[in-house]
Amino acid sequence: MKKIFLIIIFLLITNNLYANTLEYKGLEKLSKKNTFMNDKGKPYSIEEISDKKNSLVIIYNHGSIQDHKQDSCKAKPKFGYIWDAAVVPAILKLHNKKINGLEVKIYRVCSGVKGMSVKNQKKYRNELKSKGKINLIDEFKNIKRQNIILNEIENLKNLGFDKIILSGWSAGGWSSLILQSRYPEKIIGTIAFNPAFAGPKNEWQKKFPEWGAFRELQVNEFNKADTINAIIFAHEDDIFEDPKTLSFFENFKGLNLIDYSELKPTRCTWANVDKKMPSNKGHNIPQSKCFTKYLEDKNYLISFLENIVYIFKNFLYR
């Protein structure tokens, strides 16, 4: 009986180690997809950047799907730009722009991780009900993605890039904002398009109430900050978060929350597919042609970058 027990324990341990090894190898493989991109979305080598010190690197973080499913890192999406690692077109258009003596470079991060299994989400739910110690929180995909982004920031800084801005859409925008609030010494600013993590409008919260509880924990984390140097774009037709649910961000210094609800999805076409967007796709407007033009007409991104670089050069870098 003792031998059987020991064998079971051994199998459990080795199975866990094997799973972790597979996940590590998978992330190691995906990390090769983390790359600099030009304005056409084509990867290019870091060796092509001769002046790293005078580069302004924008790290882009893609959207996500349900926590227990693996994020896709496909370069060519099947359905518009939904849930993949394609960069928001307006960000790509910033490639090589000159901002107060700095040249913009776009760096795409592909996380490709799985989060908490459905089984562990149920365990997490019970932990919340018991109000005891929460042991499973590090398994959330959102937390794993933050660690991946932090690792990429350190890698880039070690290579000589010391001026880094984060950007992201959906869950990628939310993760970027969290990191901005926690590590202002590493990140000089953030551009977030329709940031979302289990937003109050999300019908999935009924099935996975623990997501809402985790969102509340993260909002509390935000509230520890005094200043968040960021610009957020939000839309009233977003099925996850809208200007009202994100209004708590207006309490932070340095943050500008832009309500762009004047843009209607039905008037827009996908950036890479010549098709109109459905009326319920307010969350996806940043992946449209009309949004890119809207930002250019309003000059939102260039103005934000100029202001952030000015603050960095005159206050933060001293």
Image (tube, rainbow, N blue to C red):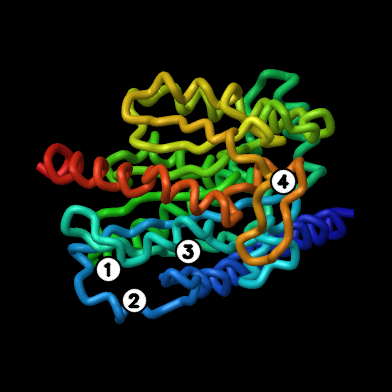
Q: Is residue 222 left or right of residue 241?
A: left
Q: Quadrant of the N terminus?
A: bottom right
Q: Secondary structure at mark 3?
A: strand
- Residue type highlighted by circle 1: Leu
Q: Residue furthest right?
A: 1
Q: Quadrant of the C terminus?
A: top left
Q: CA distance from mark 3 to mark 2?
A: 12 Å
Q: Is residue 233 left or right of residue 15?
A: left
Question: Tags 4 and 2 in contact by the CB under 8 Å rule?
Answer: no
Compare marks 3 and 1 and give the one earlier in the sequence.
3
Whole-percent x, y for residue 292 in the image: 50, 53
Q: Is the residue marked by circle 1 packed among few (<14), some (14-19), or many (20+) residues within 10 Å?
A: few
Q: Secondary structure at mark 2?
A: helix
Whole-percent x, y for residue 307 in the image: 25, 41
The disc at residue 46 is 2
Query: In this figure, which residue is indicated by the disc labeled 4?
Result: 266
- Residue 101, visible in the rendered structure: yes
Whole-percent x, y for residue 47 in the image: 30, 81
- Residue type highlighted by circle 4: Thr
Question: Tags 3 and 4 in contact by the CB under 8 Å rule?
Answer: no
Q: CA distance from mark 2 to mark 1?
A: 9 Å
Up-down relation of residue 21 to residue 234 (above or below): below
Q: Is residue 98 left or right of residue 235?
A: left
Camera-side residue of 54 and 178: 54
- Residue type highlighted by circle 2: Ile
Query: In this figure, which residue is indicated by the disc labeled 3?
Result: 108
